[in-house]
Image (tube, helix red, strand yellow):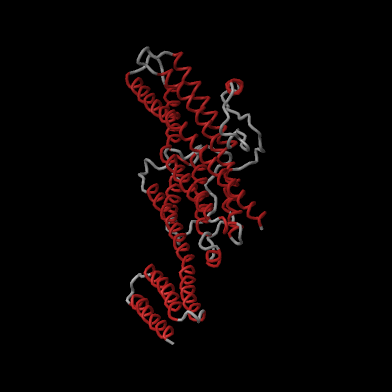
């Protein structure tokens, strides 16, 4: 049969053209597909012309070869998708590592300053947004076990994190109260426009006593604020302001209250419970997505721990037990920061501090020095005493400036963290519920 001979000749010729590049290690995927198309088309037309009466066995054989190759090409596409997903997850791990390495590289004078805490919150918001995008791109995995359980645990930790965000915001309000007392001291003792008299000294002494009482109240009861369900968008009314002014300098929240037994350290411990690295079988069963869930849970835990350490909170403490795994690249900078902050907390001057924020420690130290100085002053003032008062006033003025410039942006960033956590959780629960309803 002339058609059969010609067909098989073409078959061997095209096979030779397709196999040689394969063994040569060349990427000829596109050319191979084109060659097979040409082969199938040319063979069909040739057989139709050579053997118009005979049909299908040879023609269908040509088609089957192209079909086999097309199935092989399609079977490789999921591998490309998996490779892209794997690259995205690795990029997320790298970005988390790089950002925390930058935070860990700061000088001791910058660690736990308002500016540093703001950078930390920026890092968290960025990581949270990238994590949210990863979840959205992998909706089909989120609703399947075991990833559904891991994501549900993350969202449960997120709910508990909102309370700490609220407590942090109230702690910032507490700092603002201390700032007002310090501003009164600065205003009373500034001697540039008038001579320092006994009236100004009494006013400064009263402001220092009020500040000491407010700080003592903060140490004794943790915080007198209420915490749960505080809205970050809410503004204080004039009535709220009047009630705080008339409460003897002790600020009170008018939001919905919780028990005074609420504890920031216990809340942290409940978030840290069962926070363990995913097992190999969980990583394999979730196509690697268990790793970013654990990464984001660890980042959330660490950021909340820093906020409680730095900002006045109810029953704040640093004795929360949580482990930072070394097998992840971001574990080293987190562990380094954890150790450095613990070292700061063990310093003698910080043991009874209301917070490890640098500006708070400076305010407490300057307030003690000014209190001792004001108690020892006798009129008429000596030149040495005048210089000491002026120096103390200058230090207090710098602290007030740092509070004035830093607290408002810090509060807005805490609010942004709050909304970021809420949005991620809301979107996650929505597409989880939709997936369950479709099933």
Q: Is residue 80 above or below residue 51?
A: above
Q: Is residue 134 above or below residue 350?
A: below
* Residue 37 point in image, percent of width and height: 42, 71
> Which of 301 and 317 lies nearest the eye of the viewer?
301
* Residue 33 point in image, percent of width and height: 41, 70
Q: Is residue 255 above or below residue 7?
A: above
The mark total stands at 0
Residue at point 41% right, 41% down? Answer: 116
Quarter the C terminus occupies: bottom right
> Which of 61 and 392 lies nearest the eye of the viewer?
61
* Residue 298 point in image, percent of width and height: 51, 53
Quarter the N terminus occupies: bottom left
**Is 239 displayed left or right of 215 in the figure?**
right
* Residue 286 point in image, percent of width and height: 55, 62
Residue at point 55% right, 38% down? Answer: 313
> Which of 172 and 158 lies nearest the eye of the viewer?
158
Q: Is residue 73 above or below residue 316?
A: below
């Amino acid at each position: 049969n002339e058609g059969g001979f010609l067909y098989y000749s073409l078959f061997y010729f095209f096979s030779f053209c397709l196999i040689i590049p394969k063994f040569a290690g060349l990427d000829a995927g596109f050319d191979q597909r084109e060659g097979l198309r040409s082969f199938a088309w040319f063979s069909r037309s040739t057989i139709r012309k050579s053997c118009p009466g005979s049909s299908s066995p040879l023609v269908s054989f040509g088609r089957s070869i192209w079909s086999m190759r097309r199935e092989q090409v399609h079977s490789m596409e999921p591998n490309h998708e998996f490779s892209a997903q794997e690259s995205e997850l690795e990029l997320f791990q790298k970005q988390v590592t790089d950002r925390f390495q930058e935070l860990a590289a700061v000088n001791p004078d910058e660690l736990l300053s308002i500016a540093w805490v703001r950078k930390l919150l920026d890092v968290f918001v960025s990581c949270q947004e990238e994590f949210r995008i990863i979840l959205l791109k992998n909706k089909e995995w989120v609703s399947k076990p075991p990833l559904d359980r891991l994501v549900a645990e993350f969202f449960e930790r997120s709910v508990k994190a909102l309370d700490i965000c609220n407590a942090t915001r109230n702690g910032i309000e507490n700092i603002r109260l201390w700032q007002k007392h310090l501003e009164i001291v600065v205003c009373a003792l500034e001697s540039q426009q008038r001579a320092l008299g006994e009236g100004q000294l009494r006013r400064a002494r009263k402001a220092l006593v009020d500040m000491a009482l407010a700080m003592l109240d903060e140490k004794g009861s943790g915080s007198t604020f209420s915490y749960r369900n505080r809205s970050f968008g809410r503004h204080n009314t004039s009535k709220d302001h009047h009630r705080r002014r008339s409460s003897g300098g002790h600020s009170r929240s008018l939001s919905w209250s919780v028990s005074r037994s609420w504890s920031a350290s216990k809340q942290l411990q409940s978030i840290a419970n069962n926070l363990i690295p995913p097992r190999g079988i969980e990583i394999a069963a979730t196509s690697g997505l268990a790793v970013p869930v654990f990464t984001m849970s660890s980042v959330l835990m660490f950021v909340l721990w820093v906020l409680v350490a730095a900002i006045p909170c109810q029953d704040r403490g640093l004795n929360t037990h949580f482990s930072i795994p070394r097998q992840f690249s971001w574990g080293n900078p987190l562990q380094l920061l954890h150790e450095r902050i613990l070292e700061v907390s063990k310093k003698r001057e910080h043991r009874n501090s209301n917070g490890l924020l640098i500006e708070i420690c400076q305010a407490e130290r300057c307030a003690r020095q000014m209190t001792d100085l004001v108690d020892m002053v006798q009129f008429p003032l000596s030149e040495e005493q005048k210089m000491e008062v002026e120096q103390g006033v200058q230090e207090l003025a710098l602290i007030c400036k740092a509070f004035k410039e830093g607290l408002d942006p810090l509060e807005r960033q805490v609010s942004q963290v709050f909304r970021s956590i809420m949005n991620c959780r809301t979107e996650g629960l929505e597409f989880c519920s939709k997936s369950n309803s479709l099933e």
